[in-house]
Amino acid sequence: MTAVTNIAVPKAPKSRKPIDGWRWVGRIFLVLMLLYTAVPMIWMLLTSIKSGFAAMQFPPQWWPDEPTLASYQKLLDPNNSVGQDFLRFFWNSLFVSTATTVLSVAVAVPAAYAFSRFSFPGRRFLFFSVLLRNMFPAVIFLVPLFILMRLLGLVNTHGSLILTYLTFGLPLAIWLLRGFYDNIPIQLEQAARIDGATRFQAFVLIVMPLSVPGIIATAIYSFIGAWNEYIFAYTFLNKNEQLTLPVGIQRFFSENTTDFPGLMAASFMMSVPVVVLFLLLQRYFVRALTEGAVKH
Amino acid sequence: MTPVTGQYDAPRQKQRERSGILEQMWLNRFDYLYVLPAILVMLIVIAYPIYYTIDLSFFKTPPSLQLRDKIFVGTDNYAAILSSDVFWRVTMNTVVWTIASTLFAFVLGLGAALALHREFVGRGVLRAILIIPWVISAVAASYIWKWIYHSDFGVIGAVLVGLGLTDRPPNFIDSVNTVLPSLIVVNVWREFPFAMIMLMAGLQTVPEQLLRAATVDGAGAWQRFWHVTFPHLRSVSTVTILLLAVANFNSFIIPWIMTGGGPASASHIWITHIYELAFGRQRWGVAAAYSVLLFLILMAFGYFYVRALSGSERKDHGE
């Protein structure tokens, strides 16, 4: 014990001083970042519990004089038209995002596995074409896709969105999953093969269970991506009853431009599912993103 | 038994090495089954649109998008774009937008990652809060900030007036001079968490011993960062910056929702401009030509992108 403290003591004062200055810089920086991040969200919440009249005051009421949940009640009440619309948009978003997520995982898992394990010709080419796709903006694809959807009879259906989200989410999904597969030791499958499993069995029985964190992460990304997507939904859907949340909210509030408490309440509720999902599954979420980019 | 399989395997192995690409493809034909669904979907939704866009860029199209009536005009669409004033203004905006957003998002993300690297009470909570802007929808973010910037009842304006810095709340997004910086602030707000996450993971790969060794050698905090930490972050930084730059170059929602490109095109960037040309003014051919130009620029980007990403892949296979 004494030996340990003897070593530790001369070191400590030396490294303390220069670090302390930087530590304070770090703390102050973090406080500023926290303000930058949190103040807009807090202001959203504060506005959402004001009445329309209280929101439109100058100088603003920093804390609402009469906090009210009226905006939320209005949005969630199935008996008035606003609530009906909002709940329908919410449901549409949920349906489209869930369908996209399930399909993405189903398509990306085998593809990512193949990219990670097999060495068929064109493997690198395909992988990079997958990555390259990720670079091109949605707008380039809008007109032709719109025409394609018209051909397929999918305009104004959720199918058009699910198909596009699936495609546009795939590159990221494959990239994320491949990172996970790369880090699963190939010896495990080799052992299974020696014990008589086919390659497919080794994949399903050995690799799949091990890649559950990767699959969860990919699912979260697909879900959040689909939930937040705006451009395609904005272009492909016209009918009010089909709209997803981002477009629905935009359309609603371009008609009611002064209802800021309602708008803030709607923004908040639109954020709740994805933020909750993120907070619950944070671990996977953060790990997945970095698995592909950082090699251990 | 063993000698037999040995004899059997050797010629097959040799043949495999010598065989042409088609034969190899055939030998590996089942591998393709795994990739097939992904490729199929991508072909329909990606290859076709690209072909179609290039084709359309040489035509003058009627607003109704009834394609029987399109007229071949050669490269007129391109000439019209390159000679218009708006094109150059929008290009300038795009450059400013992309570089400033990427730079600030990266620097703030790096700062936050470094500050969050060491263990302290509440670190997990703080990290989670800082990531939230990246998770919520850009549409929600745009509305939140639009309300914050509001020229009459915006909270920033009120604070500035309260502090006595201005007499009247400034017009952040209704003024030609301030609109682009104001939107960049929103964009950085949404994007710095991404850089932060990537760099936090990068920091984990910096060997603790090296840092300690540097301390023993008398290196200050800045020297340790510059000579030990930063070189380890190089590859992850390259990937992060490229991904951010591509995302920023392609961003649409924030300018579109907050200003629609206005006032006087001061916040139009390429993507919003293309969108407006196509769906606002129904000039499909011109918009397609714009897209093709965009495509060419992105291909140049793509060269670096693939090089950076394949660099990290090569290292990974070498290990």
Image (cartoon, coloured by chain):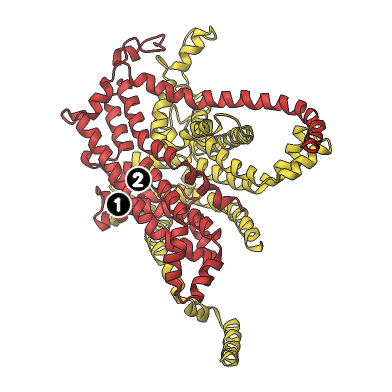
Residue at 47% of width from left, 31% of height from top? B267
Camera-nearest residue between A248 and B113: B113
Camera-nearest residue between B255 and B201: B201
- Which residue is at the far right? B217
Mark 2 or mark 1: which comes first in sequence? 1
Q: Is residue B79 above or below residue A115?
A: above
| Chain letter for the part of the structure drawn in yellow | B
Q: Which residue is mark 2?
A: A232
Camera-nearest residue between B61 and A32: A32
Q: Amino acid at mark 1?
A: Ser
Q: Which residue is mark 1?
A: A160
Q: Position of residue B229 (x, y in %)?
A: 71, 41
Q: Is residue B37 visible?
A: yes
Q: Is residue B268 visible?
A: no
Residues beneath discs 2 and 1 located on the same chain: yes
Crowding at label 1, few (<14), some or many (≥20) Cα neighbours within 10 Å?
Answer: many
> Mark 1 falls on what kind of element?
helix
Query: For chain A, what colour was chosen?
Result: red
Callout 2: chain:
A
Residue at 43% of width from left, 29% of height from top? B262
